[in-house]
Image (cartoon, grey):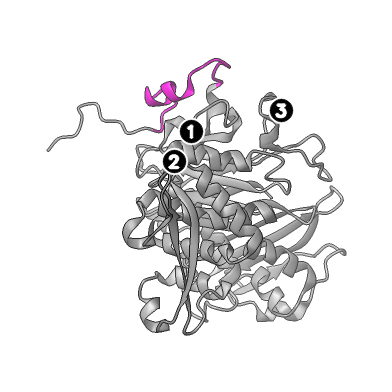
């Protein structure tokens, strides 16, 4: 469960921006949109099941998702994939020289197995300058570790750890300057670090529908092969008014190297992790459609199904997996090729205690003002991004404007009342 995320000096983000999923105490509406779970040290604090980030094109809303994705990827790869001398992969703000020379900074506050953690680090392209992990198992903070690079001495200085943390000093020497201590610990079966590592590996998920949609379609196909999931996916397709009556699953032989050419490198990594690339075998699906009084007809998924049907199907497998396991998912441009009514129905599954008993969360970027629906989302679930005169992303919540309870949010957003829309005083000029 994600509580808060902070980022500074990353891509279009220059000054520190804070994204929070803490529910506002003044807002009592839509109680099902809140995870009502008591945490040690956070009495009375409730966490939202999700939030939307609205903004104009190039305002930086996607970079908020990219920043969190970078953190999770760096945690997973820095001890295994990144080699000595490799870049850390950080991308500082480039529109002024001062920021280009400064480190990028990240901090994530989250809950794993009932314990709140704060994990953060600062890094340049060549080195991690600071890294820390604080745990709150009983409410009071426990500093599990904190390392900072001393440039004068050319070495890392480690603060004294809490007695509750099993600090293995041999792991310090195994942590490279371009890697994270949090990444090294699990490689040597450190139990406490492995638990934290696994939240980033397993619970934080990302759905990027544009370049990697086929990867998610394949995941949905894999889910279809399991009887309980088949009924759920087909039920969702039927109820979505897409004309889908059922699905046929076919296993075909294929050449792995030829098949790989249809995927991006990032998608291939995810497919291989899931075991979906089985040598010599490909699982394909064709959805069946049925006119009234006629026999069902199967359509070729890639050639004959609409873009909206393909995108909706691609989302269903991951969506069910997220709900079943209580994951936190980030979706960039959730409305791509999907009618807003379908998007609203998918979100309702998250904002519902029966379909989401484990407290899954969805954070998504969008342009669609129809999703500013007071019957769907609370006001403290809405965020905006816009760029300053310096070209830097500014992130702020709708609650900063204290809109009236009866205010038409979609109308106000399109009128520019909250900012975060394109500013075109003279229109486009050819």
Viewer-proximal residue among 373 and 312: 312
Which stretch is magenta? 402-420
Query: For the residues marked 2 and 3, what is the alpha-carbon distance in whole angstroms?
Result: 26 Å
Asked which quadrant contains residue 119, the reply is bottom right
Locate the C terminus by quadrant. Answer: top left
Residue 238 visible in the current orientation: yes
Q: Residues within 10 Å of mark 2 (few under 14, many from 20)?
A: many
Q: Magenta stretch mostly in which secondary structure?
A: loop
Q: Dot 1: within a 10 Å radius of its alpha carbon, few (fewer than 14), some, or many (20 or more) residues? A: many
Q: Mark 3 points at which residue?
A: 25
Across and down, in percent, residue 22 comes to: 67, 38
In depth, the one of 24 and 157 nearer the eye is: 24
Report helix, strand or loop for mark 2.
strand
**Disc 2: which residue:** 366
Q: Distance between the residues labelled 2 and 1?
A: 9 Å
Going from the N terminus, do you reach mark 2 or mark 1 first?
2
Tell me: residue 114, above or below residue 368.
Answer: below
Does the image show residue 105? no
Mark 2 or 1, closer to the camera: 1
| Residue reaching furthest to the left | 430
Mark closer to the observer (2, 3): 2
Q: Residue 18's image quarter? A: top right
Numbered disc 1: secondary structure: helix
Q: Residue at x 42, y 72 (%)?
A: 265
């Amino acid at each position: 469960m994600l509580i808060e995320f902070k980022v500074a000096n990353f891509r279009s983000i220059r000054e520190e921006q804070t994204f929070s999923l803490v529910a506002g105490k003044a807002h009592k509406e839509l109680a099902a949109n809140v995870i009502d779970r008591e945490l040690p040290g956070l009495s009375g604090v409730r966490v939202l099941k999700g939030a939307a980030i609205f903004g104009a094109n190039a305002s930086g809303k996607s970079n908020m998702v990219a920043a969190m994705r970078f953190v999770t990827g760096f945690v997973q790869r820095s001890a295994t994939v990144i080699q000595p001398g490799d870049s850390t992969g950080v991308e500082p703000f480039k529109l002024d020289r001062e920021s280009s020379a400064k480190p990028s900074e990240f901090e994530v506050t989250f809950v794993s197995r009932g314990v709140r953690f704060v994990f953060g680090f600062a890094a340049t392209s060549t080195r991690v300058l600071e890294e820390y992990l604080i745990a709150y198992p009983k409410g009071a903070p426990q500093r599990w570790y904190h390392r900072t690079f001393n440039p004068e001495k050319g070495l890392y200085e480690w603060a004294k750890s809490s007695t509750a943390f099993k600090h293995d000093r041999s792991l310090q020497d195994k942590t490279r300057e371009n890697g994270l201590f949090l990444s090294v610990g699990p490689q040597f079966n450190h139990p406490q670090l492995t638990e934290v590592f696994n939240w980033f590996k397993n619970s934080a998920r990302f759905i990027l529908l544009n370049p990697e949609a086929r990867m998610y379609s394949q995941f949905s196909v894999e889910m279809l092969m399991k009887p309980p999931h088949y009924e759920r996916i087909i039920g969702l397709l039927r109820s979505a008014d897409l004309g889908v009556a059922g699905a046929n699953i076919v296993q075909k032989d294929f050449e792995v190297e030829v098949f790989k050419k249809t995927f991006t490198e990032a998608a291939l990594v995810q497919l291989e992790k899931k075991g979906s690339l089985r040598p010599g075998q490909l699982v394909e699906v064709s959805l069946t459609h049925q006119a009234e009084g006629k026999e069902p007809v199967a359509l070729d998924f890639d050639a004959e199904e609409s873009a909206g049907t393909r995108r909706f199907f691609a989302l269903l497998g991951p969506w069910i997996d997220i709900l079943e396991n209580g994951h936190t998912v980030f979706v960039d441009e959730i409305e791509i090729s999907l009618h807003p009514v379908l998007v609203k129905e998918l979100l309702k599954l998250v904002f519902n205690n029966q379909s989401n008993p484990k407290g899954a969360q969805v954070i998504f970027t969008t342009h669609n003002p129809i999703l500013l629906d007071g019957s769907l989302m609370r006001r403290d679930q809405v965020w905006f991004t816009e760029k300053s005169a310096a070209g830097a992303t500014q992130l702020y919540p709708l609650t900063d404007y204290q809109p009236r309870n009866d205010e038409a949010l979609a109308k106000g957003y399109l009128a520019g009342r909250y900012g975060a829309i394109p500013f075109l005083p003279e229109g486009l000029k050819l």
